[in-house]
C-alpha cells in the first residue's frame, strides 16, 4: 500500500506504546513482535501472496524504523488476541482495537491513531436500505441517551432480521446491549466472512467499523453491498473510542477481545 500522510500524523501518538514497552522492561529492546489480524482492510489485510499489508502494517514499520528496532509482524485471530498477548506470544497489538475501559483493566494502550464508529450495511434493493438517520453519528461516550434513543427507533425496522457481526467485536457487544431483543445475531470469525453471507442472502444486515465497511463496499465482489443507517461510537475515556496500540500489563488476566 502507498504510505498516506495520515501515517506520519499518527506517529507521535502511537509511538508511545513501543517506547513504554522498552522502559517498562528496563532494558534495551532490539526486537519486538507485533500482532495484527490480517483481515480488517484497509487497516490490516493479507495479500494473495500471504504477506501482511495495510495502514497499521505501514505504521508499525515506520515506528520500528525510527526506534531502530527489529520488528516482526505476525497474524493472530482477533477473538484470541488479548489472551495471546497476555500469554506472552507477542509484545504488542496493532489491529483496529478500541481502547475501552474494560480492556484497560488487563492491557495498556498508546494514544489513539484512528476512530470511525460502527455502521450497518445491507444489500441494495433491500427494505433495510431505507433505514433512517443515514450518516448520523451517535456517541455512547458523550450522549448515551441519544444513542439509546436512536437504537430504539431502529428496533421496529429491523425486528426479526438476521444481523452478522464479527465474534468478540465492538459491533457484537453493541448489538447484545442495545438491539439483541429485535434481531437474530450470527457471529463470524472475520468481517469478511459476514460479508460473504450478506451477499449470499444468509443474513439481512451486518455491523462493523465504518472504516472497514467503506473499503468492503468498494470491492467488485461486494458491488451489491451498501452502507445504511446511523453510526454508533463506542464509549471510552478518550475522545471517540479510538483505536490504539496495546501491550500487556504486569497484572494481566484472561479477557475476551472486542474491536
Image (spheres, helix red, strand yellow):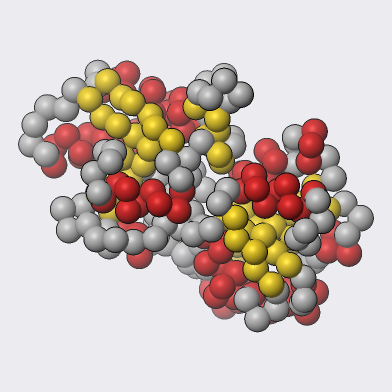
Q: Is residue 54 left or right of residue 136?
A: left
User: Which percent across, then down, holds residue 43?
Assistant: 53, 36
Q: Residue at x 69, y 57 (%)?
A: 206
- In this view, the residue in front, 223 or 189, is 189
Vertical comparison of 51 with 12: above or below: above
Which residue is rendered at x = 32% and y = 53% of the image? 83
> Relative to the observer, which residue lies in front, 58 or 165?
165
Q: Quadrant of residue 172?
A: bottom right
Rendered-image quadrant of the N terminus: top right
Task: Residue at the far left: name it.
Answer: 26
Q: Residue at x 77, y 77 (%)?
A: 159
In the image, residue 160 lies at what x, y percent?
77, 76
Q: Is residue 150 visible?
A: no
Left or right: 96 as drawn, with respect to 101: right
Picture layout, residue 123 above or below residue 6: below
Q: Residue at the spot x=31%, y=24% of the render? A: 71
Q: Give how far across and how far down residue 241 sits, in percent.
A: 46, 56
Amino acid at each position: 500500500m502507498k504510505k498516506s500522510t495520515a501515517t506520519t500524523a499518527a506517529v507521535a501518538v502511537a509511538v508511545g506504546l513501543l517506547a513504554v514497552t522498552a522502559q517498562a522492561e528496563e532494558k534495551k529492546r532490539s526486537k519486538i513482535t507485533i500482532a495484527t489480524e490480517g483481515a480488517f482492510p484497509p487497516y490490516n489485510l493479507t495479500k494473495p501472496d500471504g504477506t501482511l499489508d495495510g495502514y497499521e502494517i505501514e505504521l508499525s514499520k515506520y515506528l520500528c524504523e525510527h526506534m531502530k528496532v527489529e520488528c516482526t509482524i505476525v497474524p493472530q485471530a482477533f477473538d484470541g488476541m488479548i489472551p495471546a498477548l497476555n500469554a506472552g506470544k507477542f509484545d504488542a497489538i496493532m489491529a483496529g482495537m478500541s481502547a475501552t475501559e474494560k480492556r484497560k483493566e488487563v492491557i495498556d494502550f498508546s494514544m489513539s491513531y484512528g476512530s470511525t464508529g460502527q455502521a450497518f450495511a445491507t444489500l441494495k434493493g433491500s427494505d433495510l436500505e431505507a433505514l433512517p438517520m443515514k450518516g448520523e453519528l451517535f456517541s455512547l461516550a458523550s450522549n448515551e441517551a441519544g444513542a439509546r434513543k436512536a437504537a430504539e427507533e431502529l428496533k421496529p425496522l429491523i425486528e426479526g432480521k438476521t444481523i452478522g457481526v464479527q465474534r468478540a467485536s465492538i459491533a457484537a457487544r453493541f448489538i447484545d446491549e442495545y438491539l439483541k431483543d429485535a434481531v437474530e445475531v450470527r457471529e463470524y470469525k472475520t468481517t469478511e466472512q459476514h460479508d460473504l453471507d450478506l451477499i449470499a442472502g444468509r443474513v439481512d444486515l451486518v455491523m462493523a467499523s465504518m472504516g472497514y465497511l467503506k473499503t468492503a463496499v468498494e470491492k467488485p465482489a461486494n458491488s451489491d453491498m451498501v452502507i445504511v443507517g446511523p453510526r454508533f461510537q463506542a464509549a471510552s475515556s478518550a475522545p471517540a473510542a479510538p483505536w490504539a496500540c496495546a501491550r500487556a500489563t504486569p497484572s494481566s488476566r484472561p479477557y475476551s477481545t472486542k474491536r
